[in-house]
Image: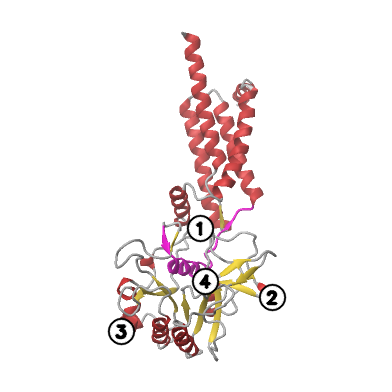
């Protein structure tokens, strides 16, 4: 064993200094590239696949907590809604009344109800004001056994806080109704859960839309974010959630209404932009499962928060140690004058160790460890080195 180790050390010592300098440079480039890629919308398909594959290894599976009431093509392109922007709020008022009659725990409206101007001047257009009054009246009449979550939009302010944009329902009297508000903007990173309470003007606080829904269901829930980053979670498709059409609710279909009682109900839109079954669905956003409607994303966020399926990124220092260690081990393996088969086995073992670290990190520490760019670059560097050495060897034997 000692002789074998001496031989391996001799091989490493015989490697030109250029190899080690290049390896160090490439590891540094890999660390920078990994940080840069994490903030860019590139390699999205691969990143989605890697991310979802990791989360599928976690035994704790999603347990959909919300019922979705969806306004689809049949409703939106029909005469009453007429494909109009902004959506007819009188229709929303009728829908809220019909849903509230079934005593859900929470009714959340996932629509942009922003005023024509962010300052609220005007608060609403005159031709739409009667519809808004109908919606406010319907919300005011929701029984106190059901909470209502209304959407807010925001914008950053120069002092580092956020400013709430005016909403058409601002200034309306909701009486004794239990009203919460939450911002509907989504995280830039499609894998993240918006567990972040904004500081808004006048020192106030504003939860995300999903936080507000969870807090309305569980008023004592601890929704503080102890980290500087947002957590992540696995996502599930629409088929995993109970979902019914707005038309069935308004028509009093018993099968649809039975889904609503004592549940979290999120009302949102899922129609096509250019007409019935024409163009893309509206309000699509990136997700680990591909493009996903905003209402479905909010439902995924609520499910993850309610069922404590939140996973935090490893601390940057820990992540760098893992990446540098794996990259250095690979550089050492490729520096040895062993058979390609042995090097291939060593490479496979290191990659498997990284995959195992990722899965273990999720299972044991609820932390996310993504694929390693430095490792990929070192593999590329070693392959190029091997090609150059063979080319030199071939030239010297001619």
On the image, numbered disc 1 is attached to which residue? 191
Mark 4 is surrounded, within 10 Å at the Cα level, by few (under 14), some (14 to 19) or many (20 or more) other residues, namely many
Dot placed on the residue nearer the N-terminal end, 3 or 2: 2
Left or right of residue 348: residue 121: right
Q: Nearer the viewer, mark 3 or mark 1?
A: 3
Which one is earlier in the sequence, the residue at label 3 or at label 1?
Answer: 1
Q: Nearer the viewer, residue 167 or 345?
A: 167
Q: Quadrant of residue 198?
A: bottom right
Front residue of 342/372: it is: 372
Q: Earlier in the sequence, mark 4 or mark 1?
A: 1
93 is within the stretch colored magenta = no
Mark 3 burial class by Cα count in 10 Å: few <14, some 14-19, many 20+ = few
Marks 4 and 1: which is nearer the front?
Answer: 1
Residue 32, relative to residue 128: is it above or below? above
Q: Label 1: few (<14), some or many (≥20) within 10 Å?
A: many
Residue 69 in the image: x percent, y percent?
39, 76
User: CB of mark 4 within 8 Å of CB of mark 2?
Assistant: no
Instruction: For mark 1, give the secondary structure.
Output: loop
CA gap, disc 2 to disc 1? 31 Å
Residue under pointer 3: 251
Q: Secondary structure at mark 3?
A: loop
Check if mark 3's residue and mark 2's residue have beta carbons within 8 Å. no
**Whole-Å distance between the Cαs marked 4 and 1?**
17 Å
To which residue does mark 2 refer?
202
For mark 4, give the secondary structure: helix
Q: Badge 4 is on which residue?
A: 306
Magenta residues span 291-315
Residue 273 located left or right of residue 27: left
Relative to 190, say whether 300 is above or below. below
């Amino acid at each position: 064993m000692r002789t074998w180790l001496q031989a391996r050390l001799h091989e490493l010592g015989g490697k030109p200094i250029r190899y080690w300098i290049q390896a160090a440079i490439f590891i540094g480039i890999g660390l920078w590239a990994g940080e840069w890629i994490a903030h860019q919308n590139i390699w999205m398909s691969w990143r989605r696949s890697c991310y979802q594959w990791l989360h599928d290894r976690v035994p704790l599976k999603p347990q959909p907590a919300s019922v979705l009431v969806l306004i689809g093509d049949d409703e939106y392109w029909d005469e009453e809604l007429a494909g109009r922007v902004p959506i007819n709020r009188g229709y929303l008022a009728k829908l809220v009344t019909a849903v509230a009659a079934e005593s859900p725990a929470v009714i959340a409206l996932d629509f942009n109800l922003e005023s024509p101007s962010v300052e609220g001047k005007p608060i609403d257009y005159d031709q739409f004001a009667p519809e808004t009054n109908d919606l406010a009246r319907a919300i005011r009449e929701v029984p106190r056994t059901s909470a209502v979550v209304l959407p807010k939009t925001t914008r950053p302010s120069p002092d580092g806080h956020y400013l709430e944009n005016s909403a058409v329902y601002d200034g309306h009297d909701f009486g004794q109704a239990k009203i919460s508000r939450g911002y509907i903007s989504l995280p830039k990173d499609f894998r993240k859960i918006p567990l972040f309470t904004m500081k808004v003007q006048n020192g106030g606080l504003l939860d995300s839309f999903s936080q507000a829904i969870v807090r309305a269901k569980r008023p004592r829930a601890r929704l503080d974010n102890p980290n500087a980053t947002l957590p992540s979670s696995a996502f599930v498709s629409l088929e995993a959630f109970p979902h019914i059409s707005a038309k069935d609710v308004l028509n009093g279909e018993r099968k649809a209404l039975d889904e609503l009682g004592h549940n979290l109900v999120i009302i949102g839109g899922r129609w096509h932009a250019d007409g019935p079954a024409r163009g893309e669905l509206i309000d699509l956003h990136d997700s680990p499962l591909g493009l996903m409607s905003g209402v479905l994303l909010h439902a995924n966020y609520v499910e993850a928060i309610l069922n404590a399926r939140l996973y935090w990124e490893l601390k940057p220092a820990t992540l760098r140690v893992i990446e540098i260690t794996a990259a250095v081990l690979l550089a050492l393996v490729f520096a040895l004058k062993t058979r390609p088969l042995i090097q291939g086995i060593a490479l496979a073992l290191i990659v498997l160790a990284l995959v195992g670290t990722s899965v273990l990190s999720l299972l044991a520490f609820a932390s996310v460890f993504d694929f390693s760019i430095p490792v990929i670059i070192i593999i590329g560097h070693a392959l190029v080195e091997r090609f150059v050495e063979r080319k030199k060897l071939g030239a010297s034997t001619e």
